[in-house]
């Protein structure tokens, strides 16, 4: 089959591309960076260099595809409007190209029309794709990426703490990019989904105290503790570390508030028995320890 993948060769895209080309599919990978073309070609895939907010480019990249994998790349300003704009362009290009199968990377919480952080953008994108007649769409909804914990390495190393703006007893649904790539690869290879459907990708569920314990022991800091930061203190810390204020508010502060208030996982709770994912936090801890050692 001919499959087009958005998202370049990131944590998900590289593994997804490798799996699909190994199974004999003709894969086109969209990237905004010309420097990625050689790496894409090395995976036996076809590079398509352009911007996902360019409707004409997207239609060319989707032309002839039996299936596409859609995801919204990170954007540092006007986050929600950017997500909505790219979602509109994806829907238009899919319809114009006559694509019949779509695997869309969404996120937990996307059942909420006016949810916190990026969830409202994911909700909008899901609805635009669901409105396409005759197109089979599978939305993958992961939780928090394990790899986000890499950003806490300097704090753990120098301050011997880890934390967020919610308490140590608050649970998080956790997902590894490898599980997400595998779920997408299985779906795109088999095209066994029909209509409009959702599948959660979750390898584990842990609270802050458990995360501190598991990651702390992995890096020889068994006394590592989870600290609850006030919203404003966390925001200023993220900005000082280089994150834009808007990104910090959307992806960190608002999600943290939703976690401590509850409701973000309601739809997941109704469907968690069908969730895809096998990588637990204890499995990721070894990967985390390797990254930690490289910072020393």
Image (cartoon, rainbow, N blue to C red):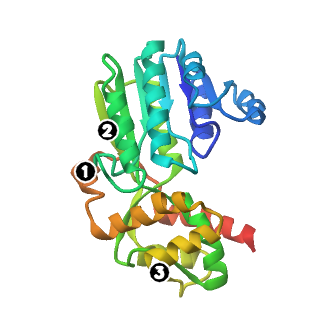
Numbered tag placed on residue 226 in the rendering: 3
Residue 84 relative to residue 248: left or right: left
- Coordinates of residue 106 in the picture (x, y in percent): 41, 42
Q: How many marks can you see?
A: 3
Cβ atoms at labels 3 and 2 below 8 Å apart: no
Tag shown at residue 180: none
Q: CA distance from mark 1 to mark 3?
A: 27 Å
**273 and 111: which is toward the camera:** 111
Which residue corresponds to the image point at 60% horizontal and 66% vertical from the top-left? 151
Residue occupied by mark 1: 267
Q: Quadrant of residue 41?
A: top right
**In the picture shown, does residue 20 fall above or below 203?**
above
Are there few (<14), some (14-19), or many (20+) residues within 10 Å of tag 1?
some
Label whose residue precedes the other's in the sequence (3 or 2): 2
Residue 73 appears left or right of 205: right
Give me the C-alpha separation between circle 1 and circle 2: 10 Å
- Indicate the secondary structure of the residue bearing disc 3: strand
Question: Does the CB distance between marks 1 and 2 fall below 8 Å?
Answer: yes
Tell me if residue 163 can be seen.
no
Residue name at image x 39 percent, y 43 percent: 122
Reply above or below: 274 against 149: above
Q: Residues within 10 Å of mark 3 (few under 14, many from 20)?
A: many
Could you tell me how far apart the alpha carbons at marks 3 and 2 are, in whole angstroms? Answer: 33 Å
Mark seen at residue 198: 2
Q: Is residue 25 above or below residue 244?
A: above
Among numbered discs 1 and 3, the one appearing first in the sequence:
3
Relative to residue 159, is residue 105 drawn left or right?
A: left
Question: Whole-percent x and y of residue 93?
Answer: 48, 20
On the image, the x and y values in percent for residue 265 come to 29, 57
- Image quadrant holding the C terminus, namely bottom right
Sequence-wise first label, 1 or 2: 2
């Amino acid at each position: 089959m001919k499959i087009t993948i958005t998202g370049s060769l990131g944590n998900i895209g590289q593994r997804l591309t490798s799996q699909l080309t190994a199974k004999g599919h003709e894969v086109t990978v969209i990237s905004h960076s010309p420097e990625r073309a050689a790496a894409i070609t090395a995976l036996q895939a076809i590079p398509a260099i352009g911007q996902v907010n360019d409707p004409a480019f997207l239609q060319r990249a989707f032309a002839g595809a039996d299936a596409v994998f859609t995801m919204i790349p990170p954007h540092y300003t006007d986050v929600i409007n950017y997500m909505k704009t790219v979602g509109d362009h994806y829907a238009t290009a899919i319809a114009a190209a006559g694509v019949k199968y779509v695997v869309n990377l969404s996120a937990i919480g996307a059942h909420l029309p006016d949810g916190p952080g990026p969830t409202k953008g994911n909700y909008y994108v899901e609805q635009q794709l669901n409105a396409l007649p005759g197109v089979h769409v599978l939305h993958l909804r992961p939780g928090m990426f394990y790899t986000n914990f890499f950003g806490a390495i300097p704090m753990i190393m120098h301050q011997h703490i880890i934390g967020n703006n919610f308490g140590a007893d608050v649970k998080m649904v956790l997902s590894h990019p490898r599980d997400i790539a595998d779920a997408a690869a299985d779906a795109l290879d088999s095209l066994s989904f029909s209509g409009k459907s959702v599948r959660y990708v979750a390898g584990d569920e842990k609270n802050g105290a458990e995360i501190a314990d598991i990651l702390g022991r992995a890096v020889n800091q068994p006394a590592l503790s989870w600290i609850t930061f006030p919203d404003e203190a966390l925001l200023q810390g993220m900005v000082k570390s280089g994150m834009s204020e808007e990104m910090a508010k959307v992806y960190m502060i608002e999600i943290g508030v939703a976690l401590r208030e509850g409701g973000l996982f309601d739809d997941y709770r109704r469907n968690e028995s069908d969730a895809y994912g096998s990588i637990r936090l204890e499995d990721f801890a070894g990967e985390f320890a390797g990254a930690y050692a490289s910072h020393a």
